[in-house]
Image (cartoon, rainbow, N blue to C red):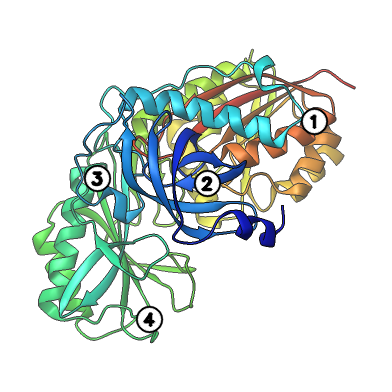
Amino acid sequence: MTKQATNAVLKKGQRFPLTIKRLGINGEGVGYFKRHVVFVPGALPGEEVVVEVTDVKPRFAEASIRKIRKSSPDRISPPCPVYDQCGGCQLQHLSYEATLKEKREIVKQAFERHTTLRADTLTILPTIGMEDPWAYRNKSQLQLKTEKGQVKAGLYAMNTHKLVDLSSCLVQHDATNEASEAVKQIVQDLQIPTYNERKRTGILRSVVSRVGFETGELQVILVTTKKDFPKKNLLVEEIKRRLPHVKSLQQNINPKKTSLIMGDETISLFGEETIEETLGDISFSLSARAFFQLNPKQTVKLYNEVKRAAALTGKEKVIDAYCGVGTIGLWLANQAKEVRGMDVIAEAIEDAKENAKRQGITNVQYEVGKAEKIIPAWVRSGWIPDVIVVDPPRTGCDDQLLKTIKQTKPKRIVYVSCNPSTLAKDVEQLQRSGYKVKNIQPVDMFPWTAQVESCTLLVYEGK
C-alpha cells in the first residue's frame, strides 16, 4: 500500500464509524476502514465508535474518538485523572480481568504477525495477574521542569513537550511518591535551576527513587548536568531532614543531550551506595544504575515460571544472559550444577557477585561483557551450557547472541521477554534452527499498561 493510495482513501479530519477489533501493541484500539488499519487511542475491542482521522501514515492511520455508539461491557471509569496524558498507564479504562485476557491476545497477535508458526497450535497460557494491581512499582524516574515559576516532577505527554506532574501516582509505591514530592518541593524552595532540554541550561534533570518492598529501604538519585553546583550542600541537608528514612542518596551526572535518564558517573552524597531488597529467600544489593524488576511481587511469580521452564535436576550448566544483578541466576542456582552470567554494566556485575557472596551461593560466576563474546569463549574452553536463560531489553536479543545460541545448541532456552514483537521475531529465528516452542506464559508485570512480560520455553529437537 503506497502513501498516495492510503491518502486517497483516508484524509486528516475525515470522520467515519469504526468497529474496534482488538488492542494494538501500545494499548490503542485497532479497527479497519476499507481494509486500512486505523489506530484509535482509548477505544476498546468490541466498541462501535465514530472517529476523526488525526494523521495518515503510509501503512496506517491514527484517529481520535468523537463518539462512542456502543461501549464495551469491560469499560470502567479510570481512577487517575491524568492516566491518558502521561503515557504511563494506557488501560485504566479497561477492567483488570479484561486487560489480562487482552495481554494474552497481544502475545498471540505478535506470533501471528512475526512468525511462520500457527498461533492456534501454540500453547499460550492465561496471563498471571495480581491480587491487588496498585502501588506495585518500586522505582520512579521523573523529569524535573520549571514552568511559570513552579517546579514539576513527571513525564512528558506522548509526542509533546508538556510535562505531566506525577509526584503522586497510583501505581507507584507510597515511599517513592513521598520522595519525589519532597525533592520537588526542596528544589522549589531553594530555587535550584531545573534542566531546560531546548536551551540545554539548568542543573537538575531528574529525580529517581527506589524502595525495597520487603526491607523498606529508600534510595534517592539526583540526576544533574554537572557534579558541582550552587546550594548542593543545602539540597543534601534538606533531603536528609525531610526524608530522614533515606538510606542511600546518590548523584548521577548526565551532561549529554540524550533521552537516557542516567549518565556514566555516580557519586554518593549520603548513606550507603546500595539498598537491599528481598525476593523469596534471596536478598539483593542494588546500586543506583543496577537493573532490577519494577514489580517485586510479580517478579517472584515470573521467576518461578522461569524455574519451572528450566526444569533443572542439579546436573545442568546454566547461562543467565543479560543477568543484571544476578536475580534470575541466583533464583535457579540451588537447582543447577553451575550458573554463569554476564552483563555490560560493571556495577551490576559487582552487585551480582556481592549478592551471591552474601547468600553463600558458590556455584555462580559473573563477568562484565557481551554474551555474544563471552559465551563462545566458554564453549571453546569446553564449558557447554545445557540451559540458556535470556532476559533482553525491549529490542530483543542481539543478532550475534542468537547466532551464538544457534551454534551452541543448548537443550533448553528460557526466554523472558518484555516485548512480544521482538520475542516472536527471535523465536522465528530459533525455531528455524531446530527449537520448538513448548509454551508461553504471559505475566502481568505492569498492570493498567499495554506491556506484557512472558516466559517462553524452547526445546532443541534438531532439524
Q: Give the secondary structure at mark 2.
A: strand
Which residue is tagged 2?
38
- Mark 1 and mark 3 lie on one chain; the one further toward the N terminus is 3
The residue sitting at 29% across, 38% down in the picture is: 92
Whether residue 281 is visible, yes or no, is no
Horizontal and vertical percent position of residue 372: 75, 47
Nearer the camera: disc 4 or disc 3: 4
Q: Which label is found at residue 226? A: 4
Residue picked out by circle 3: 217
Could you give the CA–CA distance between mark 1 and mark 2, rounded to whole angstroms? 48 Å
The kind of residue tagged 3 is Glu
- Position above or below: 87 against 445: below
Q: CA distance from mark 3 to mark 2?
A: 46 Å
Q: Residues within 10 Å of mark 3 (few under 14, many from 20)?
A: some
Q: Relative to 81, does residue 56 appear above or below in the rendering?
A: below
Q: Secondary structure at mark 3?
A: loop
- Element type at mark 4: loop
Q: Nearer the viewer, residue 58 or 111?
A: 58
Q: Is residue 461 above or below residue 142?
A: above
Q: Residue 203 placed where, x, y %?
A: 31, 80
Q: Mark 1 or 4 closer to N-term?
A: 4
Front position in the image: 280 or 392: 392
Q: Is residue 120 above or below residue 37?
A: above
| Mark 1 secondary-structure assignment | loop
Which residue is the site of mark 1? Answer: 384
Looking at the figure, which quarter contains the C terminus?
A: top right
Mark 1–mark 3 distance (CA, rounded to whole Å): 40 Å
Judged left or right of residue 102, residue 441 is right
For the point 39% across and 34% down, which residue is it?
48
Crowd tier of the residue under label 4, counting other residues whose Cα lies within 10 Å: few below 14, some 14–19, many 20 or above: some
User: Is there CB contact under 8 Å for labels 1 and 3?
Assistant: no
Q: CA distance from mark 2 to mark 4?
A: 45 Å
